[in-house]
Amino acid sequence: MTLLLSWIGKDSRKVSSVYIASDSRFSWAKTKKYDYGRKVFALQNSPDILGYCGDVLYPTIILNQIMEMDKDGILFPQSATNRERVEILFNEITKRFETYPSDIAMTGSLEIIHISRLKETGFICFVYKWTKTGGWTKNEHPIPETSDKVIILGSGKDEFFNRYLDYYKGNNGKTSRALFQCLCHTLLKMQDLQCGGPPQLVGLYNRFNGKNFGVVYDNKRYFLGREVDAGETINKIEWRNELFERYDGSSLKILDGAQRQPDELRP
């Protein structure tokens, strides 16, 4: 399964950022695992980000196809609003599913988070869900009034939420760093063996399109679940460490001038 969550960051005036993050583990029959599976996606040509949990085969197929359509500029009309993009994406996902052999290929349910932006502050969040009994549904989730979670999904959500109550009450409560610090802390202490591996992160700012982040976790570099070697080209992307500090991917040190974000709940 998965631990999948989204949250917003808000400054004194407006929502300034939205993120989706997850673990990286694919698991089978509770005994087999693969810790480098991609679960979050940032579209390059539109302000949209995605993440999924549950069954892995169909979203791996369809979301990678959607990413290629977006890259080549054939997914959305140039003038499409955020709600129009929601309809287009939901139709794309469900239309391709009509001929998918779900009776034998799907072992459980599937949920996809889609966060989209209109202009600078028009953030919306939808969850597309499939179950064997209910088929596909599409539901909007409200964007919080303060920096906080939007939604938590997956088999690891209870472990995350129970730990997050402590973060929420702490000095860093209601901040982006608290959500990400709690994710990393939870993955390190996770009891649910269906969740694990490094965290992966995508986001949207007030301007520009979807953004992929590199993550420094347990003193190693990861990009969308994949470990990155020191010799690879790594400074073309933005890096964050387990504390959500802005990091230098080459030196594995906090960037000059970046604000430190201590985690008071981890030794």
Image (cartoon, grey):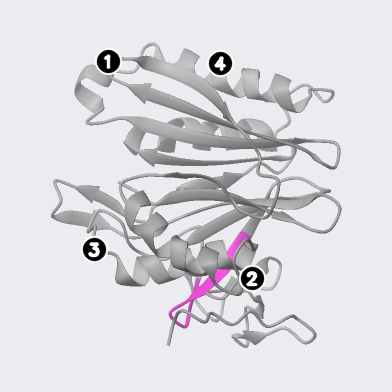
Give the magenta-colored segment's residue range.
Answer: 213-221
Residue 184, given in percent of the width and then of the height, sits at 45, 68
- Crowding near the residue tagged with mark 1, few <14, some 14–19, many ≥20 C-alpha atoms within 10 Å: few
Residue where numbered disc 3 is placed: 191
How far apart are labels 2 and 3 at the CA level? 27 Å
Q: Which mark is residue 91?
A: 4
Would you say 118 lies left or right of 160 here?
right
Q: Is residue 48 left or right of residue 107?
A: right
Q: CA distance from mark 3 to mark 1?
A: 29 Å
Amino acid type, mark 3: Gln
- Residue 38 appears anywhere in the view: no
In percent of the image, x 50 and y 59: which residue is there? 200
The x, y position of residue 163, in whole percent, is 40, 64
Q: Secondary structure at mark 4?
A: helix
Quarter of the image for residue 56 reads: top left
Label 3 crowd bin: few (<14), some (14–19), many (20+), radius 10 Å? few
